[in-house]
Image: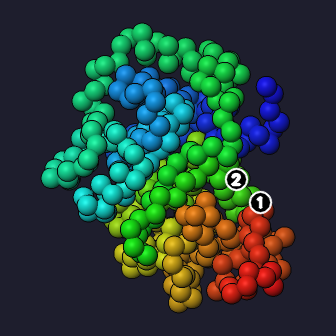
Amino acid sequence: MSKSNDEVYMVPQRQMIQACRKYPKLLKLADLTGQELDGISTLLRALVVKRLLRKILAPDEKNVGVLFPTSVYGVVVNAALSLDRRVVVNLNYTFGAETLNYCVKKAEIRHILTTKRFIERFPDLKLDAEIVVLEDVVQKLTVFDKLLAWVDTHITPVSILDWKYDLLSIDPNEMMTIVFSSGSTGEPKGVMLSHNNISSNVAGFIDHLQVDEKVRICGILPLFHGFGYSTTVWLPLMTGVSGAYHFNPLDPKKVGELCRKYRPVAFPSTATFQRNYLRRCPKEDFEHIPTIPCGAEKLPRDLVEAWQNKYGQTMTEGYGTTELSPVVSANIDSTRRPDYKDWYRSGSVGRTLFNVQVRVVDLETGEVL
């Protein structure tokens, strides 16, 4: 069955394959551990990991837990699971064991994928699922596995890959990931986001902030965060944008080093992180970054002014929640988008993304106001 261009765009995995083939030698993913992958290498590693997961996970195992930091291989593992038609559950490792096990039970997770570094950092973490340390199972891969992945990466036509990996049958409204909320209102809620939720948010982010292809975005938000998942993982994977990552947003020295080295043009963040960088990072770390959308909390005016005075750039505020997949609106620095000058409001959360609708209702009656 053929699908329209709009339907193709609603399936992030298909967009990923197309983007990696379109920009084979363009830097796609990088982090401060020294990992740098171009488009074709990203696709190759994702397909190799996909073949490895087939040897570990049961065919009927839908939801798979992930405990990876924000890094190149955290993104690759997410991509591999999605290409294998699994539902990714990036678990919040700041939760205690009891809360994590609540999430594991709620999502019916049987396996949790992780890395040696994570196990070394949390050696006493006891979870009610089988922990798979990928470095310990990589020997399950054969030369034949790697050869087939290489052929699919370099030779097999994209249309055949869509058919081979059963991506043509994906319903855009089918669940793609479960993101557990912070639990500020009690036990964490497992928010189920679809392929369409993620691709639509990526498209809205690109349009709203005018993030061009062949530029870089700084990824410091955790993979278990809704905005981090859509912008950190799938914005680079689905487009010609490159992602530069650091696992610890509370490390201003390393975040500054990352931005100096890779010179991103967009830096999704939060007011708390930005205030920390403002105090401890020199001008040359961030003076070249024109697009700094902040969410998750109110963006204080004094911080905006201090950042502008030090770095010469304007931070802007957005609004969203995980349940809204996640971004609803974002303010725009009118120097970046002159066509938005009538919509810019200092201190506001801006206008909605181009493919988002909002309405105001009476809380008591539900009447549209």
User: In the shown orientation, is residue 70 left or right of residue 235?
Assistant: left
Pointer 1 local density, CA inside 10 Å: few below 14, some 14–19, many at least 20: few
Picture residue at 55% right of the left edge, 72% below the top: 295
Q: Is residue 319 visible?
A: yes
Residue type, numbered disc 2: Ser
Tell me if label 1 and label 2 are in contact, CB under 8 Å. Answer: yes
Residue tagged 2 = 200
Q: Position of residue 47 (x, y in %)?
A: 49, 26
Q: Is residue 277 visible?
A: no
Picture residue at 71% right of the left edge, 22% below the top: 159
Residue tagged 1 = 355
Q: Position of residue 140 (x, y in %)?
A: 31, 19
User: In the shown orientation, is residue 195 left or right of residue 190?
Assistant: right
User: Looking at this view, is 56 or 102 the one in front?
Assistant: 102
Which image quarter is the N terminus in?
top right
Q: Position of residue 102 (x, y in %)?
A: 33, 57
- As drawn, the residue found furthest toward the bottom would be 302
Residue type, numbered disc 1: Asn
Tag 2 secondary structure: helix
Which image quarter is the C terminus in?
bottom right
Q: Quadrant of residue 182?
A: bottom left
